Image: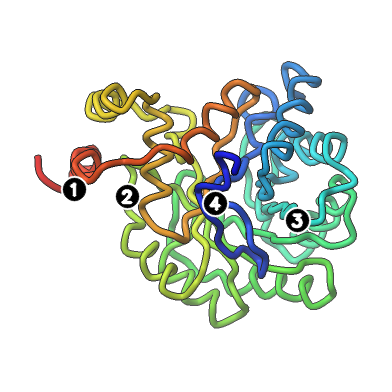
């Protein structure tokens, strides 16, 4: 059994995927813009991920833009039968690397076709609609119009399953009235736990929750408590943070990203890390939950 198998599986888009996947965002250049610093290293990381048993890769055509999808095609096509590639639409990049909404039916159709072309597939496994009312976090507002447009692309046979990203519980409820929602992708990690109740609700309904920035994102998690627990367990703080997420709920699917094969292997080893109950209690204090 490989380390990744020990994390178990969950259903994503009607298919079983291992709970420790890979996020491709860091393969693009600085600020997720432009080509990678080392093209060959980026290809090697993708190939190592799949060779290690990962069968869930997260990407978007606005990473680069177009960079990560083309790297995935170069590195992995023809794709393994069990590989689930999840992409997202709803945004575009400005010439200054800014993140801009791209919500119109025309924008969404263009994005789907760009993803199909750059990944080299006839249908997209899962497409997350990234809500851009605020770039920095979820903000209330109806998602009916863009989600209905994406659902129409699904009816055309271009998209198998639909997910939502950067959304509030109210928007998820609205979305589920429009179409089946395969997954939710929001910011969540050891220190950022606003979605605790939502995760439990989705788990009850069998819907996958995919935390982005599971290790803090552009500002990596830093906590003396996290470091102390990691030292006691003979692990790195980031391995402990990933292991905590795997234990947090069975529907959590992880997509930590890296551009380094060594770092990828370190992340995968988190699947073998068992956190004792006293460590869980200590880690809960990082977000102000549990005993002080």
* Label 4 crowd bin: few (<14), some (14–19), many (20+), radius 10 Å: many
The residue wearing badge 4 is 19
The residue wearing badge 3 is 82
For marks 1 and 4 on the same chain, the one whose residue lies earlier in the sequence: 4
Q: Is residue 27 above or below residue 114?
A: above
Q: CA distance from mark 3 to mark 1?
A: 38 Å
Q: Name the residue nearer the viewer: 112 or 27.
A: 27
* Colour scheme of the picture: rainbow
The residue wearing badge 2 is 193
For marks 4 and 3 on the same chain, the one whose residue lies earlier in the sequence: 4
Residue 200's x, y, as percent? 36, 66
Q: Which mark is residue 289?
A: 1
Q: CA distance from mark 4 to mark 2?
A: 19 Å
Q: Name the residue nearer the viewer: 156 or 183.
A: 183
Q: CA distance from mark 2 to mark 3?
A: 31 Å
Classify residue 189 by image quadrant: top left
Numbered disc 3: secondary structure: loop
Numbered disc 1: secondary structure: loop
> In the displayed structure, does residue 8 sit left or right of residue 192?
right
């Amino acid at each position: 059994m490989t380390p990744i198998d020990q994390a178990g599986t969950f259903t994503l888009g009607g298919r079983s995927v291992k709970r420790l996947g890979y996020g491709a965002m860091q393969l693009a250049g600085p600020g997720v813009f432009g080509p990678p610093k080392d093209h060959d290293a980026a290809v090697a990381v993708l190939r190592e991920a799949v060779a290690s048993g990962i069968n869930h890769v997260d990407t978007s055509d606005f990473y680069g833009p177009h960079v990560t999808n083309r790297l995935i095609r170069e590195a992995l096509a023809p794709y393994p039968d069990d590989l689930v590639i999840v992409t997202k639409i709803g945004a575009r990049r400005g010439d200054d690397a800014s993140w801009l909404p791209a919500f119109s039916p025309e924008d969404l159709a263009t994005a789907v076709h760009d993803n199909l072309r750059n990944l080299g597939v006839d249908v997209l496994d899962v497409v997350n609609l990234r809500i851009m009312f605020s770039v920095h976090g979820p903000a209330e507002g109806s998602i009916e119009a863009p989600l209905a447009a994406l659902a129409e692309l699904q009816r055309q046979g271009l998209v198998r399953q639909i997910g939502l990203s950067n959304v509030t519980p109210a928007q998820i409820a609205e979305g589920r009235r429009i179409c089946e929602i395969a997954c939710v992708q929001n910011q969540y990690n050891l220190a950022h736990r606003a979605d605790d109740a939502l995760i439990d609700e989705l788990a009850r309904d069998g819907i996958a929750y995919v935390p982005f920035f599971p290790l803090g994102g552009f500002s990596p998690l830093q906590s003396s408590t996290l470091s102390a627990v990691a030292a006691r367990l003979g692990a790195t703080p980031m391995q402990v943070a990933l292991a905590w997420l795997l234990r947090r709920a069975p529907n959590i699917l992880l997509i930590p990203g890296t551009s380094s094969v060594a770092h990828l292997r370190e992340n995968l080893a988190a699947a073998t890390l068992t956190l004792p109950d006293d460590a869980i209690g200590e880690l809960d204090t990082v977000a102000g939950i549990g005993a002080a």
